[in-house]
Amino acid sequence: MSFAISFIATRSILEPRTLERFIAISMTLPALQKLKDVESFSTMFLNYELLAHRWVRYGYIYPYAEALAGLLMMAMGIWMPVRLLLT
C-alpha cells in the first residue's frame, strides 16, 4: 500500500516518505482491527500490558490513540504547521 501511495503521489516507488507511509499503515490497520471490538481487546490487553493493570482505561484508550497516531503520521504533509510547532 505504501508503494502504491508513493507512486500515485510522486510517480516514484522509492521516495523518502515510502518507509514513513509503511509505518503509518502498519499502525493504522491493526488499530482498526482492535476498534472492531474494544471491550474484548481491553480485556485481553490487561493480560500483558503493565500500565493497563494499574490504569484500566488505558486498554480502552490505546486503540484510538494508535489509530490517531497512524492517521496523523499518514497526513503529516497536511499537518506541517503542527509538526513545525512541535519541533
Image: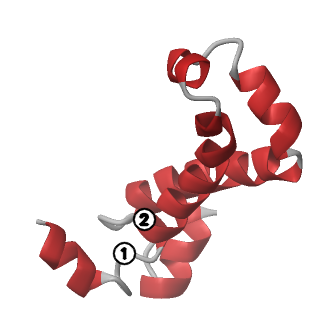
Quarter of the figure with the C terminus: bottom left
Tell me whether the residue at label 2 lies in contact with that at label 1, contact meaning CB atoms closer than 8 angstroms: yes
**Of 72 and 42, which appears nearest the observer?**
42
Q: Amino acid at mark 2?
A: Met
- Image side of residue 48 versus residue 9, left or right: right
Query: Which residue is pictured at 56% across the width and 50% down the height?
Result: 66
Residue 43 screen position, x and y as percent: 80, 25
Figure quadrant of residue 64:
bottom right
**Of 50 and 19, which appears nearest the observer?**
50
Q: Is residue 2 above or below residue 22?
A: below
Q: How is the image coloured?
A: secondary structure
Crowdedness near tag 2: few (<14), some (14–19) or many (≥20) residues, C-alpha within 10 Å? some
Q: Which mark is residue 5?
A: none
Query: Which residue is pictured at 49% across the width and 74% down the height?
Result: 6
Crowdedness near tag 1: few (<14), some (14–19) or many (≥20) residues, C-alpha within 10 Å? some
Quarter of the figure with the N terminus: bottom right
Q: Is residue 15 above or below residue 35?
A: below
Disc 2 is placed on an element classified as: helix
Disc 1 is placed on an element classified as: loop
* Count of numbered tags: 2
Q: Which residue lies most toward the left here?
A: 87
Figure quadrant of residue 30:
top right
Residue 17 screen position, x and y as percent: 35, 66
Residue to which mark 1 is pinned: 76
Query: Which residue is pictured at 48% across the width and 50% down the height?
Result: 23
Q: Which mark is residue 73?
A: 2
**Of 32 and 25, which appears nearest the observer?**
32
Residue 5 screen position, x and y as percent: 56, 75
Residue 10 screen position, x and y as percent: 42, 84
